[in-house]
Image: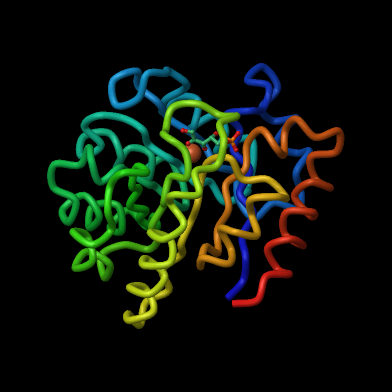
């Protein structure tokens, strides 16, 4: 199971996104946090910016929608050429229909869960999705502390994924650093979003390597 390091540009310089994306050549993806000030108490960027990012890089674009009405908005991000589009279980009105609409637009489908949302009600949805995103902080802001209380849910999700034949990624997002990534990897995560730890580092690409080394060193 390969580990993927997916830096979040929420902690990059929004006036220099292309420069900051080019500063992480070793990353497996660019994670883009879309917030609407309704689903979460913060406002970031939307579809026009993602369209510009798409033109600026060939990197795998991993879109994390923290918005109300993903049923309406999410397909547009797939049409913009994002390789993966993740919506929140708490916000989607018809998650199965939405997942199928995203796959029909050639995007991988992510289902995100806030820290207090259990995975079990969504177990039957796993064949419809390509990634589970377990938030390891309350969504809305970068730079928060990793919540260890999410570790049992990561373990339970890994067990549920193991019962399927599908290639479902298990992503964690929030408070990931060289210190916390080992606990998340040990619990079963294979895809790691890291914002502040990467972009506040003197050498962001060296931090990507350090995170990968730490995750790869964990025995499963
Ligand atoms: O989705 C979110 C926040 O809601 C994240 O993707 C953050 O951007 C991660 O930032 P750090 O916790 O790594 O600083
Ligand atoms: Fe995110």
Above or below for 138 versus 216: above
Please give left or right for residue 172 compared with residue 11 in the image: left
Q: Between residue 161 and residue 10, name the one nearer to us.
A: 161
Please give left or right for residue 74 compared with residue 10 in the image: left
Above or below for 130 versus 141: below
Q: Measured from the top left, where is residue 29 in percent x and y? A: 60, 50
Q: Measured from the top left, where is residue 105 in percent x and y? A: 32, 53
Count of labels in the image: 0
Which colour style is shown? rainbow
Q: Name the residue located 67 percent from the left edge and 70 percent from the top edge.
A: 218
Task: Locate the N terminus and report the quarter of the image it occupies.
Answer: bottom right
Q: Between residue 216 and residue 105, name the one nearer to us.
A: 216
Q: Name the residue located 47 percent from the left edge and 21 percent from the top edge.
A: 44
Q: Measured from the top left, where is residue 98 in percent x and y? A: 21, 49
Farthest residue to the front: give it: 149
Q: Between residue 216 and residue 45, name the one nearer to us.
A: 216
Q: Name the residue located 42 percent from the left edge and 17 percent from the top edge.
A: 43
Q: Name the residue located 42 percent from the left edge and 18 percent from the top edge.
A: 42
Q: Measured from the top left, where is residue 3 in percent x and y? A: 62, 65
Task: Locate the C terminus and report the quarter of the image it occupies.
Answer: bottom right
Please give left or right for residue 67 compared with residue 175 in the image: left
Residue 15's image quarter? Answer: top right
């Amino acid at each position: 199971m390969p580990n993927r390091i997916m830096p979040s540009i929420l902690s990059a310089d929004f006036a220099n996104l292309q420069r900051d994306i080019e500063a992480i050549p070793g990353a497996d993806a660019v994670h883009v946090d879309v917030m609407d000030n309704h689903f979460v108490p913060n406002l970031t960027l939307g579809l026009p910016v993602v369209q510009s990012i798409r033109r600026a890089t060939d990197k795998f674009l991993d879109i994390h929608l923290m918005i109300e009405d993903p049923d309406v908005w999410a397909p547009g991000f797939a049409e913009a050429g994002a390789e993966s589009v993740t919506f929140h279980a708490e916000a989607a009105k018809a998650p199965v229909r939405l997942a199928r609409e995203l796959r029909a637009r050639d995007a991988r489908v992510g289902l995100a869960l806030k820290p207090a949302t259990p995975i079990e009600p969504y177990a039957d949805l796993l064949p419809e999705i390509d990634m589970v995103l377990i938030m390891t902080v309350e969504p809305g802001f970068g730079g928060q502390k990793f919540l260890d209380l999410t570790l049992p849910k990561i373990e339970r999700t890994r067990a549920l994924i193991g019962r399927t034949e599908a290639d479902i990624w298990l992503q964690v997002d929030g408070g990931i650093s060289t210190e916390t990534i080992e606990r998340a990897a040990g619990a079963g995560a294979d895809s790691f979003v890291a914002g502040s730890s990467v972009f506040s580092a003197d050498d962001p690409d060296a931090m990507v390597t350090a995170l990968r080394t730490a995750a790869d060193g964990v025995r499963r």
